[in-house]
Image (spheres, rainbow, N blue to C red):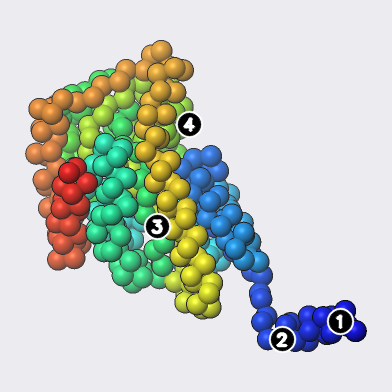
Amino acid sequence: MFKSITAFALLFGLGMTTVVQADEWRYAMEEGLTDPQGMYATQFKSYIEQNSDHTIQIYPVGALGESADAMEQALAGLIQFIDQSPGFTGAMIPEAEAFLVPYVQPTDPQEVRRYFKEGKAVNEMFHEIYREHGLELLSVFPEGEQVVTTMKPFRNPDELTGMKIRTMPSPLLLETYKAFGASPIAMSWGELIGALKTNMVDGQENPAIWIEAYDLDNLAPVLTYTGHAQYTTAVMANADFYDGLSAADQKLIQDAAAHAQDYILDAAVKMDEIGLMKIRNTNPDAVINRLTDAERAVFMERAKVVEQAYIEKAGERGRKIIEQMKQDLAAARK
Ligand code: 6CS
């Protein structure tokens, strides 16, 4: 009797009153599973799968084309989640290029953690902006200090003159390297290794953990710490998809993002150290140059025009973001 009631309840009662739909969601990113974006995505996926019947299929870099191709698919709703960095998103959302403006982010790992965890700019000012472009912003997190790798050393803009530096396809990154004295060339990730091998470019910028993972230190062995930026990335959902979900599923996604964000902010504190240690241990030819405060001051002076160019493009909203970033930077340093 009990058994048949349970079976009945399952078939008709529970089944009809609480229909639980198990969806498979797609998540594209610009990196591999063991890279920072993959570490975040793996945490996000396991949180969702442990706390619901939904599943997540992760598509690492290349699986769906380049970064720009994945964004097209995310905006068309073919992919539900995407990790794309401002270095790529900036061409579509000028305000997002705030994360590329030189010298408004910390480089010390503990300061970086505070800046991303508590900073008002990072946590409060971009949600509405991404929404205007059909994206629900879930997380913004750091991957390490940007390090410039070149064939020859440089310590000032004069020594950078004539060097062809690859940047991600962001207009503001091109402005930055022009202001720094170099000849920048924007290109996708997929083209960079070939461009370095064929001397089409003389250098590039990326965090130490990425430089080591993809052997960039062997292609351009002089690593220069200019202190100008943190590699920042962002995770988003297609806004129409997100808006069509139940309140419970929206909460699930926000909770999964908060969980993955906490995880990656803890892990990020060690990334620069690990990346540099591996480079030192595996590449005897690597030259590590950290600019002195006086040398940095010259680049900081050059960066003023870049900040101005950002504000011209991003308008009043952009000006407020930069102001807030500077306040968050000061607070993170306390
Ligand atoms: O330089 C790039 O294009 C790549 N850098 C990182 C750290 N992640 C993905 C991105 O495509």
Tell me the quadrant of the picture where the N terminus can be found.
bottom right
On screen, residue 287 above or below 126: above
The first of marks 2 and 3 along the sequence is 2
Please tell me how crowded label 2 is: few (under 14), some (14-19), or many (20+) other residues with Cα within 10 Å.
few
- Foreground disc of the pair 3, 1: 1
Q: Foreground residue, 217 or 111?
A: 111
Residue 311: x percent and y percent? 15, 58
For ligand 1, tell me if the residue under mark 2 lies within 8 Å: no
Q: Which residue is mark 2?
A: 16
Closest to the camera, between mark 1 and mark 4, is 1
Is residue 291 in view? yes
Residue 3 percent across, percent down from the top left: 88, 79
Report the Cα–Cα distance between label 2 and label 4: 51 Å
> Residue drawn at (47%, 31%), measured in percent from left and top?
214
Residue 184 is situated, as x and y percent measured from the top left of the image, at: 27, 38
Q: Is residue 182 above or below residue 20?
A: above
Which residue corresponds to mark 3?
A: 139
| Identity of the residue drawn at 40% across and 18% down | 280
**Amino acid at pointer 4:** Ala
Of the numbered discs 2 and 4, the one sitting upstream in the chain is 2
Residue that mark 1 sits on: 2
**Mark 1 → mark 2, Cα distance in angstroms:** 20 Å
**Amino acid type, mark 3:** Ser
Disc number lying in front (2 or 4): 2
Residue that protrudes farthest toward the top in the picture: 284
Dot placed on the residue nearer the N-terminal end, 1 or 4: 1
Within 10 Å of the Cα at label 3, are there few (<14), some (14-19), or many (20+) other Cα atoms? Answer: many
